[in-house]
Every structure is written in C-alpha cells, then in structure tokens.
Image (cartoon, coloured by chain):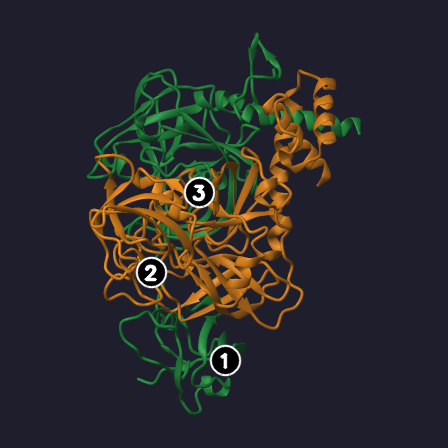
Chain colours: A green, B orange
Amino acid sequence: MKRKLKLLIVTLGFSLSVLGTNSLVIGQNEGRTSSFVEKMIAQAQPRMVKIFGAGAGRVEGFATGFFVSKDGRIVTAQGVILDGRRVRVVTANGTSYEAAIIRRDRQKQVAVLKIEAETPDYFELSEKQIGEKGDWIVALSNAFKVADKEEPLSASLGIISLRTEMEARLTKRDVAYKGELVLIDAITSNPGAAGGAVVNPAGQLVGMIGKVINSSETNTRLNYAVPCSALFDVLLGQKTVAAAEPVVKPTEQADLGIVLFKFGGRSNPAYIDRVVRGSPAAKAKLRTDDMIVAISGQKIGSVKEYNNLVETLRPNEEILIIVKRGVEMVRARLTPRAKKK
Amino acid sequence: MHDLNRLLLLLAVIVGMGDLPPSCFAQGETAVVEARQDIADGPQVLSQEELFRAMALTSRAFRQAAEVVRPSLVTIESFGGVSAVQGRIGGIRKQGEGNTTGIMISPDGYVLTSTFNFIQQPAVITVITSDGKRRVATVMGRDDTRKLCLLKINGVADMPVPKMVSVEEMTVGQWVVSLGVGYGDTSPALSMGIISAKNRIGGRAIQTDANISPANYGGPLIDIEGRLLGICVPMNPQSQAIGAGVEWYDSGIGFAIPLAGSDELIGRLKKGERIRPAFLGIQSVPNPDGDGLFIKRVVQGTAADEHGLLVEDIILKLDGEPVNDLLKLRQMLNQFESGQEVELTVYRAKKNEEDAFQLKLGTPPKPKGEPEQLEPPKIR
C-alpha cells in the first residue's frame, strides 16, 4: 500500500505540472519549480533548428528541423522549401548557417541537411518503434514562424492517438505518404511546423512532424509524426520501397461475370443486376440484387470503387467476396477468369 | 482500476488545492479527505524516476479507459449516397471516404451515432461490432437538435453496453478521452482532454477540449474509468445545419451529447421519430423605443405566421421571461424542439394591446429543391 501511495503522489506531481499549476513544488532545481514537461521541453530545445528556404505560392519558406548527429546533420521535412538556391539554418543560440542538402526521400517526405558545425545536442535516432498509443508527447515546432533568431520553439502537449498505416495527401497532385504514421492529439498541422520534433517523457524522439496533409478517410487535416524508425532508414540512406506508384494493371484482365445496376447522378452501391451464366460469379452462387460489400478485405462503397478494384484483379487468383443479400451477409470464394477480348 | 480512480481523485484535489466540492470526480467525501491526507503525508520532492513512472501511469489510465469501452464501440460503413455534397461542409471540403464510429447502447443491438456520418445519405449502412461481425443496420429515428441518429442491428441479444455517467456527476475540469475509428484502423484513435463546460447548446451538450472531428463523430467521450459521458457530435450554437460545427474540428472546442437519463429520447428514436429544431419564423431587431424585439419580417407558413404575428409587432416575453436581444431569444428557443409549446407575450401594434398566448413551435423551412432527408449544410 505504501508503494502504491507513493505512486499516486508521484502521478499527482506530474499531473500538476501538466496543468501548469505552481501550487505544489515538485523537485527543487536551483530554487525554481521544475516540472517534468518543462524538462522534456528544455532538453529538446537546443537540438531544434529553424529552417528558412524557398517559398512558392501558398507554401511558406520556413520550417523546423532537429540535429541527429554530433557533426551537424539535421532531419527535416522534404518540401519546396529545399528547392531554392540556398537553405539557411538557425540554431537554438541564434547562429545562422548555410546548409547542404544530403538526402531527400520523397516517399517518406523526409530530408537530411548538414551544417558545418559540431553540436553536443542531438537526438539519437532509433530503428525501434518509440511510443505507444496513450503515451504523453510534446511537439516542438516553429509553426507560423512565431520564434525568431534564438527564441525557443513552440511546445505543445498531447498524447499519441494511434499508430497506423494510412494513405494521406493534401491535394490530388501531392505524392501520397504511405506507411506508418504516429497520430497525435496535439495540433501540429500548421504552416512551418513540418520538421518539428515529437518527444516522449524519456526525452526520446517519437518522430518528426510531417507536412500538412489530409486524411482521405476523414478529409480532415492530420496531426502526425513520421516515426523515428523511418527517419533512421532515411538517415542511413537505406533504400525505401518505391514511392506510391500507380498500381500496375495486370496485362490480362479479370472477369467475374457480374453486371452491375446502372443509375445516374448518385454514387451508387454495387448492386448486381445480372450474373453471367457459367461465370465465376454464377459458380459462387451470387444472385441478382446482391450488393457487393467487400472484395478481398477491401470495402466496396460504390460502383466506382468496384470498377477500380476489379481492374487490379488477376485471372485465376482466388478472391473472397462478401455480398449483402436482404439483410444477411453472404461470403463466397471465387476465381476470376480471363476477360475475353 | 480502483487505484487509478484514487490517483485521479488525488490529482483533482491537489489542483483545486482544497476548495473542491466533495462531488469532485463523483467520489464520496471520505475519499476526498483521504486523498488530502495522502498529499499531506507524502514526500514533497520527487525523483526523476518517480516522475517518469507517474507519467507512464497516467498514459496507462487513458489506454485502460479506452479498453473498457472498446467492446461497445462499432465501426459504421456506408454504401452509395450523394456523390458529393455541394460546396463545403463547415470547414472541410467534403465528407471523407472512410468508415465512421458508433456506440452500442443496448444489448439487443441499438447503436447510437451522429447524423453527420450520413450526410451523404447512403443507401445501405452496415455495422461492424467489436467481435468483427458485419451486419446490415436499419436507420431508426434521428434527433437533429442533438445530431444523433439511432441504428438497429438484428439477431443480437447480448451486446456489451457502456456504463453511463449523468451530467450531475460530471465535473468541469475532469479528464476525458474521445474515441473514434474514423482514421481507418480497427483500433480507435484516442484524444485526451477535460470537460470544458456543461449545459451548452440549450442544455443538450457538454463541451470538451479533447479533439473532436469526423474521425470520432458518433464515437464516445469517456471518463478515466471508461464510462460513457456522451456521444461526440459536431455542434455550433449559431446554426442548426447538419454540418454546422465541423468547422471547429480538432480546435479545442468540441461537443458531446450526454445520454444518461435520456431513456425518453431513446424511446422516441426507437419509434422512428425525427426530432427537429424549433423555429419561430421571424426576423427581428431590438426594440429602439423600449423593451422587447421589434419584428421586421414574418416568414410565410411558419409558427409566427400561423399565430398571426405581424411586422411591427413587438415580442416582449417568452415563457414569462423578458427577451430584449436576439441572442437571448435564440438561446431560449434552442432549449425547445419543434412541436413544443411556449407562452409568448407580444405587443400587437395594430390593436395597440399586449397579448399573451400559447404558440406551437414549428420547423425550419426546407431549402428549395433539396431532398427531404438531407438539409444541406450552410455553405461558407
């Protein structure tokens, strides 16, 4: 019980610091109240840099970055900002350096810069997954260019919302980010925040704040970090999987023997109008008026989604199809045949 | 879980430093006294290691709370619907393509979610329960004043339902966690925050600073024990449009509809009722020559029109309470729903007399050429 009690009070102390109250002293530090979150921030600040480069249209010419090595390597977000003639880096003490671009990874949206200076303050990148859902995090960035010269960056507190693989992009023209993202509930989807650091209570780097992107699932802006392990790969120059290339269409098209209902104007569910006699769909006992719900684990929300998915299927490769029949869900396996030309 | 309660209670006590009501965190008075004693006895200086462990423990509390409610969390899929809603819905260009969130509220398969999730009027809706089974859902009633929608799945009998907390039990400042599966993962995304205020939007909603967005509209807002505080919905006190409130997504201003004690409401939704916002049907300005609201325009076919209100009449009181500005009138009307009666005291200009009478509130007129089911959001 004594032990538990201690823990309780410990938590108290922390929570207090989170709420920014100074009514209880937690650990004296040269006569000053010090809180845990304050420590997280203080430790990270000297490792952070402000980055200035090219702006284009509505894209700002400023971003954030952080040191990842003693010899002045900096990780930041890949973007238009690096396309100008020079990229300037301002360190925590206000010194300005010209930076060389060492690496740009368009798939992970990460870039590595280097300045000619040594620094004792840097994040040790890890190939491991740092942080799990619910963990506290502090996000540091120069969003909106609030901090100038030697002024410290803006910090905000939150938790890790979710670690998930997702596809996200801001506009249709953007290269979609593909891979695991660390979603956080601190708001970081702001201009200039890209390249900022997300750190955990142990002072470890959880990831790098990515540029502003929208989730196609919710059509809202995402607050997220590119996980530390992905940064590690880029820093080491490890080849990543080819960037979100368009799905290669199979040379031979697959045919299920399904004819869908056709309506106009609305985005319609994929209702089966007719099943071709002797076709794979007929063998799988699919019927008129069945509504296709999912194919091979992928939800089919509309006729369009069905057509897109069928294009990626290959003949003679078995698929699992789920249809709604009345109010029942019916599962069937079927093997597409080659489409006659 | 009990330890966590105590822990958070302690937290509450210390933040308030002694001035907290015993009802704080819905715990008994004894617990609060004990908590204060714990603080008095405890060490004042804590080591880094202790602080780190404490931080990890709070995170565990968030995760644990989420796990408690997770069996009642459902994923909602929509099929078909309007391909694109015209213009913008609040702050976003259009609704996302992903799944949405709901919560099981009865063992026999009633699911509550937000009307926002069906803004595109899907032809078919399915619900995936936490055991991974997918079932076709029927839309029952909807409450436009709370942005809630009731679904029913059949063939189930022992679905897990969350424990509910009444508004009286809630404390402004207490921890909350919002949950939603809208980001496409089967595991819900969490966001933590506090209750910012109670009795918002005509007393229907509680306000929170946890992130509320299309990723968790229809999902639960829970306390640190994993009990249901409310259903996350988009809301804006200035507008009743279906998409209103989305412009505040992830902004620190979020709303949830408490459910405890709303058996009557749920009963009406089960019967398929549609509850609409109250609408009076006048445009008015504060009376330049004294008290009340001076009527500038009466919309045809509305409650005001049917009760013979005319331009130049002056509204003096609503249910006996003086109304001198538009915000007050809107705030008061917000507490009602369409079909309910209010007592209106009006100065009738033509007759030069004061008149008090019962008025049955109507519904907002439908915009021309719009489908019956869907009032499009106000386009910004």
Residue A86 position in % (x across, y down): 24, 29
Could you say which is closer to the camera, residue A220 or residue B334? B334
- Mark 3 crowdedness (10 Å alpha carbons): few <14, some 14-19, many ≥20: many
Name the residue beneath numbered marker 2: A246
Instruction: Name the chain letter of the residue that bears numbered label 3.
Output: B
Mark 1 and mark 2 in contact? Answer it, CB < 8 Å: no
Residue type pointed to by label 1: Gly
Residue B200 position in % (x across, y down): 45, 42
Query: What secondary structure is found at the residue carrying circle 3?
Result: strand
Instruction: Name the chain letter of the residue that bears numbered label 1.
Output: A
Could you say which quadrant of the image residue B54 lies in?
Answer: top right
Residue B115 position in % (x across, y down): 42, 58
Could you say which quadrant of the image residue A267 lies in?
Answer: bottom left
Query: What secondary structure is found at the residue carrying circle 2?
Result: loop
- Mark 2 crowdedness (10 Å alpha carbons): few <14, some 14-19, many ≥20: few
Name the residue beneath numbered marker 3: B254
Seen as rendered, the residue at the extreme bottom is: A277
Instruction: Name the chain letter of the residue that bears numbered label 2.
Output: A
Name the residue beneath numbered marker 1: A326
Could you say which is closer to the camera, residue A37 or residue B329? B329
Query: What secondary structure is found at the residue carrying circle 1?
Result: loop
Query: Is residue A43 shown left or right of residue A168?
Result: right
Q: Is residue B149 above or below residue B195?
A: below
Identify the disc placed on residue B291.
none
Query: Is residue B154 shown left or right of residue B124?
Result: right
- Mark 1 crowdedness (10 Å alpha carbons): few <14, some 14-19, many ≥20: few
**Image quarter in which the N terminus of chain B is found:** top right
